[in-house]
Image (cartoon, grey):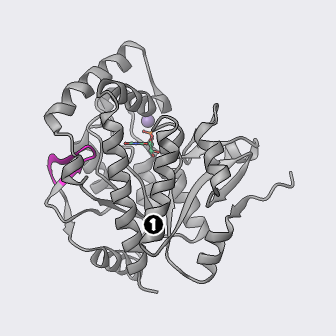
């Protein structure tokens, strides 16, 4: 096997060499989280926002067995339309690479790749977490374990209410993962600004968030940090409205016996059709908002 293991795009390679700020982006959101062509539009606009805010975007995916950190427009477009893309997390990242497959990275796998490449900040939409009914299904995303072990700051819009948000926060606390909401006392719930739960920690600026992570590193405290950035008010869908759709989506997942890694993509797809596409607009708005904050954090990181 003489494929390279990792390819940095020219733009990302140059930024890392010059120690300029870089923000990692995941690809499962592109292949399994949003439909074509909105997914490509989202991916390109998010990259543009990161550049506009003084950092270099690095979208991460496995393409034909090679771990790419930074995708050019052709690769991004190909991935956004590709069929049969694996969803790869910690368990299957190396599997996809060894088998020469194409795989989109989840939050967990993107953190591994970002850290491997020397990138400390990552923007996404929502993280995986503890699913509702996890006491029976044991369905807890590998994203939580990754946050506990890999020193990358993950900027998200909170956890979707398709999850059990309260149990998700409990597991993060147990694993010693700081959860910081930017500019609010309430922990956000993705489409909604308030999950009804208090955020464990609050900071109000990107600089303060960067300083917090720098202090953890100085103390030798392992692992990542979860930064929650509430969706802008203008794009919010209230929690009560989302709850009806979530219940319907969960019932369908149950009736169809959906399990394992299919659960999250299935629920996201159901909610998209139940909201008549409105959830997608909110989803795109919040990822853009997270990209901006992540770029500011990367720019504010001390050397
Ligand atoms: N939650 C979202 N949107 C997403 C995902 C989660 O609101 O696109 C994706 C992310 O890539 C996340 C993955 O890492 O789903 C979690 O999947 P699982 O629950 O199977 O670990
Ligand atoms: Mn799962």
Task: Choose top left, top right, bottom left or bottom right for residue 177.
Answer: bottom left
Q: Nearer the viewer, residue 28 or 51?
A: 51
Would residue 93 be visible to someone looking at this image?
A: yes
Q: Where 140 falls versus 246 (above or below)? A: below
- Crowdedness of circle 1 by 10 Å Cα count: few (<14), some, many (20+)? many
Q: Nearer the viewer, residue 201 or 27?
A: 27
Residue at the far right in the pictured view = 2
In reply to whether residue 243 is colored magenta, the answer given is no
Determine the residue positioned at 27% across, 58% down.
229
Task: Choose top left, top right, bottom left or bottom right for residue 281.
Answer: top left
Q: Where 184 falls versus 211 (above or below)? A: above
239 relative position to 97: left or right: left
Location of ligand 2 given as a quarter of the image: top left
Residue at the far bottom in the pictured view = 303
In reply to whether residue 197 is colored magenta, the answer given is yes
Which region is colored magenta? 187-198
Which secondary structure type mostly characterizes the magenta part of the structure? strand
Q: Position of residue 1 (x, y in %)?
A: 86, 51
Determine the residue positioned at 67% across, 65% down.
9
Q: Where 181 falls versus 264 (above or below)? A: below
Determine the residue positioned at 56% across, 82% down.
19
Residue at the far top in the pictured view = 255
Would residue 92 be visible to someone looking at this image?
A: no
Q: Position of residue 32 (x, y in %)?
A: 50, 36
Q: Position of residue 147 (x, y in %)?
A: 41, 57
């Amino acid at each position: 096997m003489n494929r390279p293991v990792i390819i940095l795009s020219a733009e990302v390679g140059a930024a890392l060499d010059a120690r300029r700020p870089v923000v990692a982006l995941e690809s499962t959101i592109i292949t399994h989280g949003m439909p074509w062509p909105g997914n490509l539009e989202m991916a390109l606009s998010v990259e543009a926002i990161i550049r506009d805010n003084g950092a270099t975007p690095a979208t991460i995916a496995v393409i034909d067995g090679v771990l790419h950190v930074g995708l050019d427009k052709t690769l991004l477009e190909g991935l956004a339309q590709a069929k049969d893309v694996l969803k790869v997390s910690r368990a299957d990242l190396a599997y996809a690479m060894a088998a020469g497959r194409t795989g989109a990275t989840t939050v967990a796998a993107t953190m591994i790749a970002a850290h491997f490449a020397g990138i400390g900040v990552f923007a996404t939409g929502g993280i995986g977490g503890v699913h509702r009914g996890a006491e029976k299904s044991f369905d807890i995303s590998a994203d939580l374990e990754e946050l506990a072990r890999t020193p990358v700051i993950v900027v998200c819009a909170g956890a979707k209410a398709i999850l059990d948000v309260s149990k998700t926060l409990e597991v993060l606390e147990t694993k010693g993962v700081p959860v910081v909401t930017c500019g609010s006392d309430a922990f956000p719930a993705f489409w909604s600004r308030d999950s009804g739960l208090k955020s464990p920690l609050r900071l109000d600026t990107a600089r303060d968030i960067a300083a917090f992570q720098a202090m953890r590193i100085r103390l030798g405290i392992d692992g990542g940090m979860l930064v929650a950035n509430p969706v802008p008010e203008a794009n919010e869908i209230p929690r009560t409205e989302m709850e009806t759709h979530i219940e319907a989506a969960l019932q369908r997942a149950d009736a169809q016996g959906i399990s394992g890694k299919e659960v999250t993509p299935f629920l996201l797809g159901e909610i998209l059709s139940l909201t008549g596409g409105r959830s997608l607009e909110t989803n795109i708005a919040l990822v853009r908002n997270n990209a901006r904050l992540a770029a500011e954090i990367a720019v504010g990181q001390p050397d």
